[in-house]
Amino acid sequence: MLALGLNEIRNGSFKRSVQMITYFPHFISTVVMASMIIIFLSPRIGFVGPLTDLLNVIINLLRGIPFLNNLQSVRAVDFMGVSKAFPTVYVLSNVWQHAGFAAIIYIAALAGINPELYEAARIDGASRLQKIKNIDIPGILPTIVVLLILQSGEVMNIGFEKIFLLQNSLNIENSDVFATYVYRVGLVDASFSYGTAIGLFNSVLNLLLLLTMNSIARRVSEHSLW
């Protein structure tokens, strides 16, 4: 969606600015990114405290309305200490960090579409949405399928550094993944054989997911890795 949106921008300077803003987080160190997330979500020094205060001001104003006078004030929440909130925090921060850089491949695929197709669509009176639906998406569909297959083989490899840096005793129930578990069992507890077995199981599971996704893609579409 980001690549399609960038492809529709006609103002060159604005397009480059948006690209720079979306690409930049990808090059931030994982340690710095984790520190930024912790600071941003801190109820004392981050955005959560001021947003909570603003929300309470709005609630106080709404209490003047008769049927809203029972509204309760809200308290600042330390999201890094809420176990159920960790998956959402991790996924949204990953999208913010990597979406711009990941869109480069799709932008390159869009650049390879025959310009005559756009010209014919313009002559036929097609809208922008119709061009996206009938030209852009079919044009990048092979790239979408290939990247989907490749990413399916990395589903279990969520990553170690970022989760390890964001993990604490309060959110470990929902933040513990294969990589952090292998580190804790294999290195901290010195159970090397058990940690190796878990790592091997993870690799085999990723391979099976890759083969399954490639088989499904080959059956439902004309595109696959082999």
Image (spheres, grey):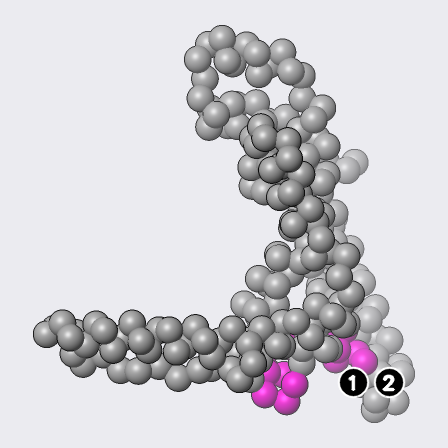
Q: Secondary structure at mark 2?
A: helix
Q: Is 68 contained in the magenta span?
A: no
Q: Is residue 129 left or right of residue 57?
A: right
Q: What residue is shown at x 83% (from left), y 91% (from top)? A: 189
- Residue 216 lies, with reference to residue 52, above or below; the image says above
The local secondary structure at tag 1 comes to: helix
Q: x, y (%) of residue 110? A: 66, 29
Q: Quadrant of residue 107?
A: top right
Residue stretch rendered in magenta on the structure: 168-183
Of residues 159 and 186, the one nearer the viewer is 159
Categorize mark 1 by other alpha carbons within 10 Å: few (<14), some (14-19), many (20+). some
Tell me if I can see residue 133 in this picture. Answer: yes
Out of 124 and 53, give the one closest to the viewer.
53
Residue 10, picture quadrant: top right
Q: Residue 99 in the image: state x and y as whole percent.
A: 65, 50
Which residue appears farthest toward the front when viewing the image?
13
How packed mark 2 is, by other alpha carbons closer than 10 Å (few <14, some 14-19, many 20 or more), is few
Q: Say which quadrant the C terminus sits in.
A: top right
Q: Residue at x 67, y 16 (%)?
A: 114
Circle 1 is placed at which residue position?
Answer: 184
**Residue 151 location (% of width, % of height):** 71, 51
Percent of width and height locating residue 75: 39, 84
- In the shown orientation, is residue 143 left or right of residue 41? right
Please say whether residue 217 is visible from this viewpoint.
no
Q: Is residue 158 left or right of residue 85?
A: right
Determine the main secondary structure of the stretch shown in magenta.
helix
Distance from the alpha carbon under mark 1 to that under mark 2: 6 Å
Mark number displayed over residue 187: 2
| Snapshot quadrant of residue 71 | bottom left
Q: Quadrant of the N terminus?
A: top right
Q: Are marks 1 and 2 in contact (CB under 8 Å)?
A: yes
Amino acid at dot 1: Arg
